[in-house]
Amino acid sequence: MSKVYIALQDNDESRYIVEAIEEVNEDCTIIHMPAMVRIERENKLVIAREVVEEKMGRDWDIQELHLNLITIGGNVDEDDDLFILEWKV
Amino acid sequence: MAAKKLNIKDKYRLLTRDLDWDFSYEDRKKAFPYEEFEGIKITDWDKWEDPFRLTMDSYWKYQAEKEKKLYAIFDAFSQNDGHLNVSDPRYVNALKLFLTGVSPLEYQAYQGFAQVGRQFSGVGARVACQMQSLDELRHVQTQVHAMSHYNKFFDGLQEFSHQHDRVWYLSVPRSFFTDARSAGPFEFMVAIGFSFEYVLTNLLFVPFMSGAAHNGDMATVTFGFSAQSDEARHMTLGLEVIKFMLEQHEDNLPIVQKWIDKWFWRGTRLLTIVSMMMDYMLPNKVMSWKEAWEVYFEEAGGALFKDLARYGITMPKYSEVIEKEKEHISHQAWWTFYTHGHATGFHTWIPSDEELDWLSEKYPDTFDKYYRPLWELAKEKEAKGERFYTTGLPQLCQTCQIPMLFTEMDNPNQNSMRDTLYKGERYHFCSDGCCDIFEEEPEKYVQAWLPVHQIFQGNCGGPDMGDILSEFYKINVGADNMDMKGSPDEERWNKWKGKA
């Protein structure tokens, strides 16, 4: 097992995205560093559009993620509803 | 009935499949002449998938939004004299190194991706490379804009482009990219798209930029993270291209592995400069180089290579040496710059007592034993008014072009040197890794433009060192360089802050 990770700029939009990640991904680790938030999880991490929209209270396009993204680790799979990071081992 | 809105997958398919054309009367091989000579076999470009599936309309939309946010912050930064909020004027020297050493690489990446974006016959890869090319151009422009504010108040930022092509330590990053750009398109992708973007830029743009925030530099952290927001897409392109080559044909495996071995070694050498920026040039510390290395190289890179093992890829050659180097290289590099501080384009200094203690704590196995005594000696000499500058010119490694500053990792008191004979000439290297790379492609590396050799050959003006520095390098000697103590930068800072 390896860890996948995503880092986001620490701002108001990311706050909701992080909340949505926490809700969907059991046992993920959230690390705050100056100006950024890093979220790690064993093997797989999912961002669900619907959950982010619920937190934000507005429509959210999954590609808006690019605006606040800093870095990722893992294979990416993205469609209109889900953004998935995964190691395939 | 209203037209149904296309989903991401359909939009991407339309962009990367239906817009491409076949060659009916021209020879496809002549249209893409560089695609085969490296030996990489591609049987079906249609198997190419970009997981981000970004189409041009979305690309422009999101990039425009990023730019608007970024420039609003630049305006606020300069209108509010943001340079006065940095933790310590020494910090700005990290920016000087960034602007002269890193920003021009963004420009080289822009050129490189434009070139490979033209040379791949698969349209998915071509689109991704074109987007990356545009991103890289954006990065160099935003970095120059951000730094232009500092240039009004600090020395050493005025000739970054001129210096990048000439100055001895800047030939290290410069030659790294020219090496990649003069390779074929697939090697370029492994070099820059995969090795550099996937693993190594994280070490620069994540912990270092977080460090910029921690040192009160709003402009740099903002351009850093704005650039890095493109980087996730670049990392994914790098990983996809590796997987694509390995899935296309089994004969590609040994070629790809050899490139990974070469470019991870070249990359770790290049990052030496970042290691000292993190450990010595950030007055407020976020994490040590060693800690950053463990998170982003060992942990993240380790996970990556475990994932690639299913294709038969193994950890890069000399990984075991690389693992030991994290304890040493930042200290060896800063000592070298400190002792050559009259020939740099930025200021150097002895770490404060507090910083020395921090280094002792972060490097319990090496700092007190090997490196702290050097700084204690430098402190003694400085107290006696004998700040030390070395007078000789360093020998450079033929491959990475770094001065021979590294030691054997198992014996840090012994300098690491290798050499090999080629056509009756002897060439010198800092390591087995660099020597191997030369021996693989000697005709390429015998042409290296080594700054010290060029000085001795009389190609850089002179012969007086002062003339070379001021006329050939355009370093404003005595203002841009030498010790931070007593510098015009320090004097101005104290005046702004109302100190004596």
Image (tube, coloured by chain):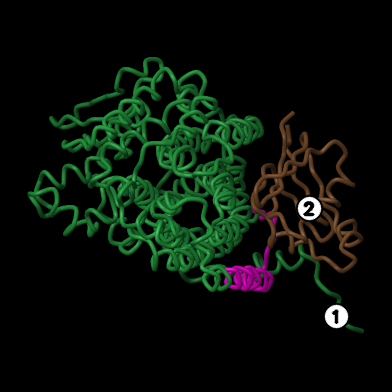
Q: Residues within 10 Å of mark 1 (few under 14, many from 20)?
A: few
Which of the chains bears the disc numbered 1? Answer: B
Chain seen in green: B
Q: Which residues are magenta?
A: B48-73
Q: Residue at x 37, y 46 (%)?
A: B176
Q: Position of residue A11 (x, y in %)?
A: 73, 58
Name the residue nearer the viewer: B252 or B297: B297
Residue lying furthest top in this view?
Answer: B411
Q: Which residue is mark 2?
A: A83
Q: Is residue B214 above or below residue B389?
A: below
Query: Can residue B317 be seen in this snapshot?
Result: no
Q: What is the residue that sits farthest to the front in this orientation? A: B500
Rendering coords of residue B369 (x, y %): 42, 17
Quick check: A46 above or below B127?
Answer: above
Instruction: Reply above or below: B80 against B231.
Output: below
B30 part of magenta stretch: no
Q: Residue at x 39, y 20 (%)?
A: B370
Colour in which chain A is shown?
A: brown
Q: Is residue B401 left or right of residue B246?
A: left
Most foreground residue, B374 or B414: B374
Q: Most prominent secondary structure in the magenta stretch?
A: helix
Question: In the rendered structure, which amino acid carries the disc numbered 2?
Answer: Phe
Check chain identity for marks 1 and 2: say if they share one. no
- Disc 1 element: loop
